[in-house]
Structures are given as C-alpha cells and as structure tokens.
Amino acid sequence: MALGAATRNDFPILAQTIHGQPLIYFDNAASSQKPTAVLDAWQHYYRCDHANVHRGAHTLSNRATAAYEQSRIKVAQFIGARTPYEIVFTRNASEAINLVAQTWGLSRLKPGDEILLTVMEHHSNIVPWQIVAQRTGAVLRFVPVTADGSFDGDAYQRLLGDRTKIVSFVHVSNTLGCITPAAEIIRLAHACGAKVLLDACQSVPHMPIDVQELDCDWLVASGHKMCAPTGIGFLFGKEQLLEAMPPFLGGGEMIAEVYLDHATYAELPHKFEAGTPAIGEAIALGAAVDYLSHLGMDTIHAYEGELTAHLMAGLSALGDVTIYGPTQRAGLAAFTGPEGVHANDIAAMLDQEGIAVRSGHHCTQPLHRSLGLSGTARASLYFYNTHAEVDRFLLKLEEVLAFFRRLM
C-alpha cells in the first residue's frame, strides 16, 4: 500500500468534508496536520502529568521533566546532533533565528562585516539580520537565483570573501521548491571562516537530515511543519558555539544563581530556555519524531518524490499555468494562472471544491518582487497525500482556469 493511503487514517482532520467535498489538504508547506499519536501525547501530558518541569521534587514534576527531556533526546537523534545539549527548544524557527541573530550576531558582528543571505529567504531569515545589520553596521549581501529558480552557486562564490562572517540560507525554498546544495554551501563558507545557519523548516519534515554530515553551525526547524503542534520549534547549535553565546532572554529556568546585582547562568541548553516552556508541545514534538522515524525519512522522501513528479507533470500539461522553480524539486509548486487572474481568486475557488492551497507571497516578498509577481498560488504535499488527490486537484484547477478564461 502506498504511504499516503497507509497513513491516511492516522490523521482524523483529513476525514472531513469542506463545502460538501472531501478535504484535500495541499497547504503543508505552511503547516502540516497532526496524527492521532501526537494528539494523544499532548493530551496525556495535560490529563495525567501536567506540572512545571525541572527543580520539582514531586512525582508529576518528575514525570513531566522526564518526558520533556526525552523529547530533546529524540530530536537530537533525529537530526544527528552529537548531544541533546545541542538542542534548544524555541517557540518556532523564527524565534530560533532571532536567538542566533540577537546573541551571536550582536556580540560578534562589527561595521563592515558581511551577512550573506539569498533572495529566496523567508522573511524570518531576513528581518532578524536586517535588525542586526542596523545595530552593528554589518552589511547584508544576497545570493540571487538562476533563471530556472535554483540557488546561484557561481554568484555565491563571487560574494563570499574575508568580510563574510555568517551565511544564513534556506535548505528548501518554500516558494521555488529548489533544494540548495547545503553541504557544499557550508563547506565553502567555512573555508572563508564564516559561520553558517541553515533554515531547515522545509527539509527536516521531508528528508533525512544529519547535522554532522552537513557540518552546519546552527539549524532551525518548526514543529508544526513536521506533524507536531504549533508553538514549538528547535535550534540546533554546535555545543562550543552555544557555550560562547550570551543568553537570549532573562528569567526563570535560565539561571544558576541570582543575586541582587548579578546572576550566573544555567548550563546548556537551559541557558536559552527562559521561563516555563511549552511542555506539552515539546512532548508532542517528541511523539511526532517517533511517528516520522517509524515511517522512515527515506521512505517519506521517496514517496513524496513520486507524488511531486505526478503533480509537476499534471501542472505542466495545463495551459496558461506558469510554475516557478526548477524541475528537480521538493514537494511543492508555486504557480500563476492566466494573466490578470489573482492567485487569491484561484485559491478561493479551489476551496469551494474542498481543496486547500496557499496564495500570496508566502513570506517571500523580495523573491516575488524579483520575479515581478504580487503573489502565487502554492500546492504543497506531504506523505499523507495521495495520487488520487493530485488528480482531483488538477481536474478542479483546470475547471477554475477555464472559468477565468471565459471571463477574459
């Protein structure tokens, strides 16, 4: 049985109808759905084990702490970290990037230093570095994309230099679907003495990731894109780097000792986890990692490759559809219809058929401007989607486009 059909019943939300039609959820790049195992883990914590973590002497606190820290171990193993101390729980990937920018960036960068990004970055990997550049006098540089919508490796090598102090880039573009050559990008950056942050929000849920093989200095991901709840994400950082970085937020949990005039800080990773954390969400993230690991990331990646090829072939066969990004891609496709037809109108009409796609700029306004676009429609896949869903999406999209052609 294909992976999509085999996992379908694990996701109760997918069984519903929308406007009288079976739900087809093709908005996975924005947020994934949650399997019963994850929902049960979250609920079990609040029903049976809820208490604050760490420093508690009673049974509930001990159980909550054990489950919370076990999730950290699971995440570390999932991405190949050397130790769980290299995993910091955050609210999401945006907070994780801000953590690095506000601690390492503000303390290390100086006027004239260069921060190297790409034009296809999510706003979460642009705005924090803009703030740092404004405060430190560092300079932002941007790697363009090629004509087919891929990472421009030649331009990257021209931009790298002695002034490059950090390279922060996306592993998989949430608009173009291109998979950047992360290991080579990181190798070249390190050869110039630069540190590297990898935005893996669109890769960790879909393919095997090993931070030791990649050799990235930091990696960020969001739980809600990998079958976990919202409000939980994580930062991986090399232990030596995290040790040298100052705290991000002050308060409870992140301290060792507090005096009236100074404080000492907790050991990793707690130095970066001020206040009561999202305990239930972190435990549910651990359950999501278990679920994905049971399926196998190689299996997920292979199945999504088949599904993506089917989607791309069907979209390419439709008239008046422009697809953005290279042929070889991850499981998403941003596209536009006939000239003058807004992506929001396409998405709204597909919704009437029970099909959920995203429309707009997908938090990549600079990329859309470079393409001369105000927005695109985006269909994004996950392992619980099926070939039959792709077929129905293509059929209904063709009907929507035909409707707009008649109006023009």
Image: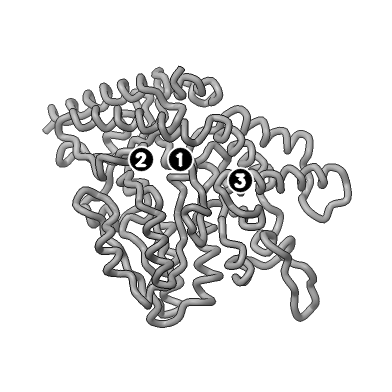
Q: List x then y, in percent, for residue 331.
A: 36, 37
Q: Residue at x 51, y 62 (%)?
A: 217
The answer to which of 264 and 241 lies nearer the viewer is 241
Residue 44 to residue 99: above or below: above
Please indicate, yes or no, whether residue 398 appears anywhere in the rendered image. yes
The answer to which of 385 and 76 lies nearer the viewer is 76
Q: Amino acid at mark 1?
A: Met
**Does dot 2 land on a helix, a strand or a loop?**
loop
Q: Amino acid at mark 3?
A: Gln
Tell which circle, 3 or 2, labels the residue nearer the N-terminal end.
3
Residue of label 2 = 330
Q: Residue at x 24, y 44 (%)?
A: 324
Pointers 2 and 1 in contact (C-beta within 8 Å): yes
Q: List x then y, in percent, for residue 155.
A: 25, 63
Q: CA distance from mark 2 to mark 1?
A: 9 Å
Q: Quadrant of residue 125?
A: bottom left
Pointers 1 and 3 in contact (C-beta within 8 Å): no
Q: Quadrant of residue 46?
A: top right
Q: List x then y, in percent, for residue 168.
A: 42, 62
